[in-house]
Every structure is written in C-alpha cells, then in structure tokens.
Image: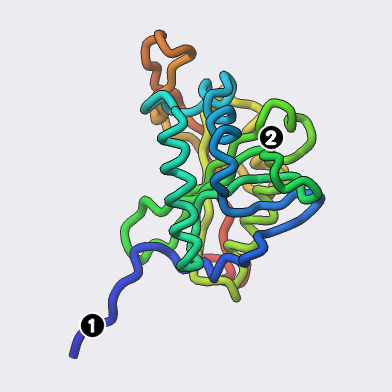
Amino acid sequence: MNEPAVRTVPATGRWPSEGLRQGGLLVRVWQPDDVLQLLDLLLDPTVRRWSPRMFVPDAERCADRVRAAREAELDGRPTSFAVVDADHPGQVLGSFDWRDVHPPGFSVLDVGYAVAPAARGRGVAGTVLRFVTDWLLDPAGGDVERVQLDHAVENDASCRTAVRAGYPVEGRRQRYLPLRETEDAPVVRHTVCLHGRVRADRGPA
C-alpha cells in the first residue's frame, strides 16, 4: 500500500479571492500594477535597515515576486500579499508574507511584514499581523500549529508591533540575523527577539 503524500507546507485553508479585510485595511494578492510600489517599499531605508541585504531590489525582481504570488493564487495558496487601503485598493501601504522553512510535519509558518513610510504610525502592521494570524490559526482554516516571527533586538518598533498583535516575547537567538546599516557597511550579525502564536484549540502541550 502506498503511503499518503506528506505535505511539505502547512495547509492554511483556501485564501479568499476577495482577500482579508479589517479596520479599513485589505490584504490581497499582489497585482501587476503594484510592481513599482513594491519596489519603492523594498528600497525604503528603514525596510532595508532591518532586512538581510541579499540583493538590491529592482523592478525585474519585484515583477517576478508579483508573478509568483499570482500563480500561487490560482491554487488557492498564495503566501505573498500587498496591504492596501480598503477604500483605495490600488494604494499599497505595506506587505505581508509567510513561508515554511521547517521539516515536514512541523506545521510552523514564519511571517514577515513591512510598512510604507506614508502609512507608518497608524497601526497598520499590528492590525494586519493580528487578523491574518487569526485566519492562519483558525481550526477551520487548516493545520497550522504555530506562527512565528523574529526581528533584531534593536528594532523596538517591530517588537511593540508583535506584542500588540498577540505575539509574546519567547526568547532570543544570539548573532542570528546578518544586517548592514548601509549598502557599503560591513555585515553585522544581530541577536534577534523571537515571538510566536499557537493554535488555541489544542490546549497546553
């Protein structure tokens, strides 16, 4: 008898075609018209400051990211999204992504987000982080057991955002995140603060 195939990505439920909406914000899959706004977001100095500089973003890479997100949407399993004003869905306020980098069976997702300069100070990241995580961990939505994120310990704003969204501080990973203050600066490995949320219906371990 053949063994059933093991899912390598936690099942999250089928992403709603209309996206997820709350508090005047809409999280939707990237669209072709978003490419230049995505590029502006990724080139923002604050976003660059707290993200590993694996490459310099350009329009071609952003178009590839948008194309991949739209292809994944066809299967109901996109993982990369634009955060937009619900009343003006062409206005990109930020981004939200999740990824599975863990062995099969762990059912753990890592999430990340960024907010455009003009949208900062409005609670965009905290609101989106909370309601998208609620969807990911909904018992009816799939088999995700845990959602987690980390950030450089110096990034106080990201820490406050995570705590407000219901992600308690769980600990630190020493010298984990390679960052540069500027394009020409040396790489410095930063200690990160780890946050996580788990499915409430499972009860304590």
Q: Amino acid at mark 1?
A: Glu
Q: In this image, 87 relative to 42: left or right?
A: right
> Which residue: 61% across, 46% down?
82
Q: Position of residue 201 (x, y in %)?
A: 61, 72
- Residue 28 is situated, as x and y percent measured from the top left of the image, at 63, 54
In this view, 71 is above or below 118 = below
Q: Quadrant of residue 176?
A: top left
Q: Quadrant of the N terminus?
A: bottom left
State the residue in front, 157 or 91: 91
Q: Residue 118: which quarter of the image?
A: top right
Q: Is residue 172 left or right of residue 198?
A: left
Q: Residues within 10 Å of mark 2 (few under 14, many from 20)?
A: some
Residue at screen point 54% across, 46% down: 32
Q: Is residue 33 left or right of residue 160?
A: left
Seen from this angle, which residue lies furthest bottom? Answer: 1
Quickly name the residue at label 1.
3
Question: Label 2 amino acid?
Answer: Arg
Q: Nearer the viewer, residue 70 or 20?
A: 70
Q: Position of residue 199 (x, y in %)?
A: 58, 65
For the point 59% across and 25% down, which residue is it? 155
Which residue is more in the foreground, 126 or 35?
Answer: 35
Q: Which residue is mark 2?
A: 160
How many residues crowd mark 1 within 10 Å: few (<14), some (14–19), many (20+)?
few
Asked which secondary structure carries label 1, the reply is loop
Q: Residue furthest left?
A: 1
